[in-house]
Amino acid sequence: MLRYTFFRLVQAAFVLLVMTFLLFMLIGMMPGDPVENMLEGNPALTPELARQMRELYGVGVPLPVRYWHWLTAAFQGDFGFSSLYFRPVLEILGPALLQTLKLMVATIMLSIPLSLLLGAIAALRPGGWMDTVISFFAFASISLPNFWLSLILIIVFAVQLGWLPASGTPLAETPSLGLQIYHSILPVTVLTMFFVGPLLRYVRASMIETMSSDYIRTARAKGLSETTVIVKHALRNALIPMVTVLALGFGMLFSGALVVETIFGILGMGKMIFDAIRYVDFNLALIGLLLATIVTLVSNLLADLAYAWLDPRITLK
Amino acid sequence: MSAIDTELAGIPSAPRQTIWQLRRKRFLRNKPAVIALAILLVLSALCVLAYPYSLLMELDPNETNLLMRFRPPSAKHWLGTDSLGRDVLLRLMYGGQVSIAVGVLGTLLTALIGILIGVWAGFLGGKVDAFLMRLTDVVIALPMTPVLIVLGAVDLSKLGLSQALASSPGAVFLRIVIIIALVDWTTIARITRAATIEVRQREYVKAATVSGARHLYNVLVHVLPNITTPITVAATLSVGRIILFESTLSFLGFGIVPPTPSWGNMLTNAQELVISAPALAVYPGLLIFLTVISVNFVGDGIRIAFDPRSEK
Amino acid sequence: MNALVEVDNLNLHFPIDGGFFKEKLTLRALTDVSFSVEEDETLAIVGESGSGKTTLGYAISGLLTPTSGRIKFGAALGGHSQDRPVQLVFQDPFSALDPRMMVGDIVAEPLRLQGVSRAERLQQADDVLEQVGLPAESARRYPHEFSGGQRQRIAIARALIAKPKLIVADEPLSALDVSIQSQILNLLNKIKRDRTISYLFISHDLGVVHHLADRVVVLYLGRIMEIASRQDLFATPSHPYTQALLESVPRISRGRRKPGQALKGEIPTPLSPPPGCVFHTRCPRAQEVCRRQVPELLPAPGRPEQLSACHFKD
């Protein structure tokens, strides 16, 4: 197990390194002069520094060399300044990441019980009317454009009914927890609607499979009540691999968060990346994308490890 | 010889139901899938009729008229006009052409990349397989939307294209198709690989090899025709996913650029209209939703119809 | 008789990838295997599953490359590995035929790979189908329309069309009903009468082997235990393993019978075969020498044609 963990860690680190190169290359191909971009926003900018930067990252310098300069600086903790916010990118990153994590955690906390409940109900009678309705809901969930759902919810609940705010960020300087939750209702609803579909389909399929297995028949034969059979045996068994599904859905959820944050004006990672690319903030876009990649890589890694830990049948390579 | 005679008696005199007739029958029994297919056909027909409709009603999808902004539905403008006075219905029809075209072309390219990589990995196995599957894992691990935005933001003139060419509608359209295919091929690659590995071990492939067949012959003659089912199902489902990717990208401003309409970019400014003209925010998204959910139902129907285990 | 195929000291090992951090294992499928197949002969390979029978068949047909040793085709055949005059017939008639191809195209495939024109090869396919007892109109049908026995005939037709000198038949009967088995057996015998052809008949069914084989090779854990003519093998089995195999099929064994020789235990894993004689873990006669020394394949006492690899052979 330790060996396996170590191997996967080394692998993830290697992938991350490759990703830094690819992202560095891609972001260099955004419109505008990358050097200008990297310099802008640095309050300590002097002609001398500008000349140095041109030597390191200028047009004539080959891509691998430019990448090497960036990488060595990055390892020393120097990710440069944001041309959009006129601050070091690392200062912007922390609060943004926190915002996004809040959003994602809230979504996951809602999605898990919801998908378990709906999945279990659907699996009780496959093909019955409850199953039909729930399956249609799952199809709708994976087919809904989340930006449109956001707009529709804003139109209905914020504009027409006036019940909820259209903005995801409270105006108050130090908003209370209640206010924060109040402003998060719509964004979290959109994300949950987007995330629950795949989870629910998974729970339903795995429940149907377990319900027809031998040990469920044994449990029933022992005279256990149907509720005990479903909750204690079938659902619990469906939960273990769900860890994997959840972790693999992390990247997807992050993608959804980008759209939702942009529409609801939440200053999270997604909106940060979006703005950085839109206004060609070289340093900020790079670090934002890297962090997003790290988050998904780590969640994938955890998924693999959790699966290996939880399921004793898996033999490790 | 009597033994052989009895053998002959067992040979069917007329071909039984072909597998395709069987599949069609099973698909037609699946009501949601049939309804979804009908919706798709109607929507596609609607989009194809955009040009004749514009002639008939004497409308131009891109001509702006600031005196005609936000008009309610009328005899000439069935769904009213948008913020620049253009006919909403006509722009929806043209936008649908773009969205569906991206969905279909993107899927074809996705399938091409996915099949090439999947067959390559599955048929050769060993180190090639290990490398390609690691690559697939990495691409799957990417946060899709951010990566697509970066790819959408790439300045094509930095790749050597002339400024005029880089910003032409054709280049923009192709760019969307290509960048989506670049991140979406993984599902089909995995499915193709698994199916290839299964077919590769079949004995008819071994028989051909003994008779002198090379890899390419086996792949083209034996493997590909036998793995079409899982690929068809995966490709159908990927049409819906790609339409969603395109609309999201276009909505965010990194996909199809105005004035060319697409269902996604028709919503780009809708956020500012939620008070003045909420209907404008409803139509394009509703069409995206309808198209994607229909494609997904059809894909599911194909999966069930093609699945030998669902045979009753 | 002339040797058609000579197998000389054949070894075939599969490296098992133990992952990045584990040591690599080796599966010894075949070890030091030497024998020959004569022209116009039916040579049976018998053994339990896991004995390396199928691997041997694949190696001779060129599907697997030997780790060491050689497989030589008779000088008259040129000996090129590219155009080995070998065809295969498989155990499972369902996965042996491509479900997407018409039977005519399946049967004609070896000719297609030789570059024969479509009209010509389909003509030949019709002829061969009739030779195996199927009407020519079968050519325009798909495999799923045929029964298991009919499919096996199609597979045999595909093998015959290439005019092979040797057909490797890998348990061609074991997936069929007993009544169909005898029909296919008769067909194989009829083909043998009509043309000069050798069979390498892989089987675990000694009854069938007794019915069909000229000579028999007994394989255990990738090594040859005994090679003998059918008469010698069934009348006077030399190796204790052969005796045990015959013991389990009492009807056909007319030789001396020593009670209590039925095989006990399981065949060991070829990942770590026992040292010395590979059979010693299950052998009733095993002595200390069997654990240390690999017995050579030498003639049985008084029967120079019957070779047996045992320190205490009969």
Image (spheres, rainbow, N blue to C red):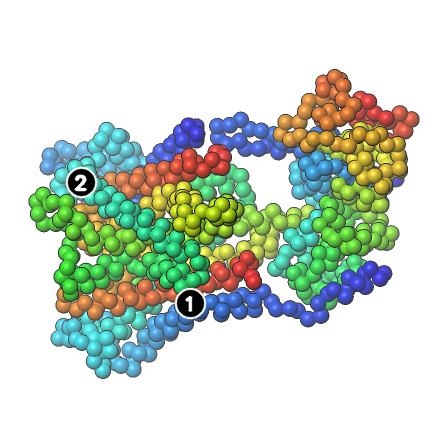
- Residue bearing mark 1: B32
- Same chain for the residues under marks 2 and 1 in the image: no
Quadrant of residue C8 in the image? top right
Outermost top residue: C288
- Residue bearing mark 2: A95
The mark total stands at 2
Disc 1 sits on a residue from what chain? B
Disc 2 sits on a residue from what chain? A
> Residue B289's x, y, as percent?
32, 64
> Residue C309's x, y, as percent?
79, 26
Pick the front one: A273 or B21? B21
The residue carrying pointer 2 sits among few (fewer than 14), some (14 to 19) or many (20 or more) residues within 10 Å by Cα, namely: some
Residue at 15% in and 33% down: A49
Q: Is residue A226 above or below residue A148?
A: above
> Residue A219's x, y, as percent?
48, 45
- In the picture, measured across the screen, residue C129 lies left or right of residue A227, that is right
Q: Between marks 2 and 1, how big is the CA–CA gap?
A: 46 Å
Residue at 22% in and 31% down: A77
Residue at 70% in and 59% down: C147
As shown in the figure, which amino acid type bears the numbered disc 1?
Pro
As shown in the figure, which amino acid type bears the numbered disc 2?
Pro
Outermost right residue: C302
- In the picture, measured across the screen, residue A97 lies left or right of residue A208, that is left
Outermost left residue: A173
Q: Is residue A250 above or below residue B42?
A: above
